[in-house]
Amino acid sequence: MSNIDRQTLLSDAAPMAGSQFQQFQPMDVESQQPEPTPSIFKQSSHPVALIFHFLFRTGALVVYLLANFFTSSFVLTFVIAMLLLAFDFWTVKNVTGRLLVGLRWWNEVQEDGTNVWVFESRDQTRIPNGVDSRMFWYSLYATPIVWLFFALIAIIRFNFQWLLIVGVAIVLSGANLMGYMKCDKDAKQKWSGLAASAFGSNSGILGMLGGNLVGRMFNRG
């Protein structure tokens, strides 16, 4: 084969090899990486309320656990802890429960001295944010359990003065837990009652229409 023929074959093969090489392009690895999951506060419908829902109770726990490293005065620790627990009780009872799950409760004392539970609930057609609801109920159940654990430790170590703080924390967090459990149960009963009454009224209307239709058919016959 002559030199001219070899050069012709190489010149014909070069574009083909180049076209095949261009088909294999490097993959964009960054575009295929999954997007980072947004934080809980970005997913929340009420991030400020969610922050305050955890702020005071977490502060009370921090004061209880770390106060001895900063002061030897139990009175100062007790006062700060009581203020944080009171703020947490009021905030959860009146603000965060209404915003995060659409529930609110309170207790009224009647003239005869009896206590009456009063409940408010959102419209059942309005579904609360899933993140807000989970964070609210998880913390509501977990807080009394954590304080009960600290109560057990205080009893084992005979730290009865610290048991005063733990006792108040258990009472306040337990009151909120019980109140919201009753409120949630009352809201579900109201919704089921409304659904049952709506179904009953609709079935009654359908029954009347069906009876009239059957009566007309027999009358015509």
Image (cartoon, rainbow, N blue to C red):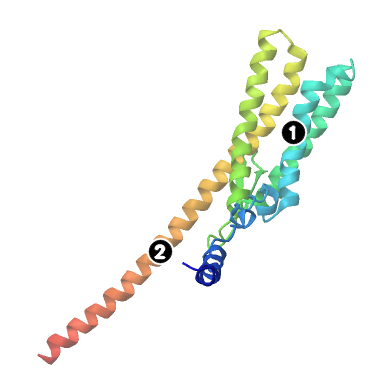
Residue 79 picture location, percent across and down: 85, 26
Residue 32 picture location, percent across and down: 58, 55
Asked which secondary structure carries label 2, the reply is: helix
- The reply, left or right, for residue 120 in relation to residue 13 is right
Mark 2–mark 1 distance (CA, rounded to whole Å): 44 Å
Q: Hey, which residue is sitting farthest left in the picture? A: 221
Front in this rendered view, residue 170 or 120? 170
Q: Amino acid at mark 2?
A: Ser
In the picture, the quarter occupied by the C terminus is bottom left
Q: Taking the image as drawn, is residue 110 in sight?
A: no
Residue 205 picture location, percent across and down: 33, 75
Identify the residue at horizontal 70%, vertical 23% (top origin).
167
Which residue in the protein does label 2 denote? Answer: 197
Front in this rendered view, residue 7 or 194? 7
As drawn, 96 above or below 3: above
- Give the number of the disc on residue 58: 1
As drawn, 192 above or below 174: below
In the figure, residue 68 lies in which quadrant? Answer: top right
Q: Amino acid at mark 1?
A: Thr
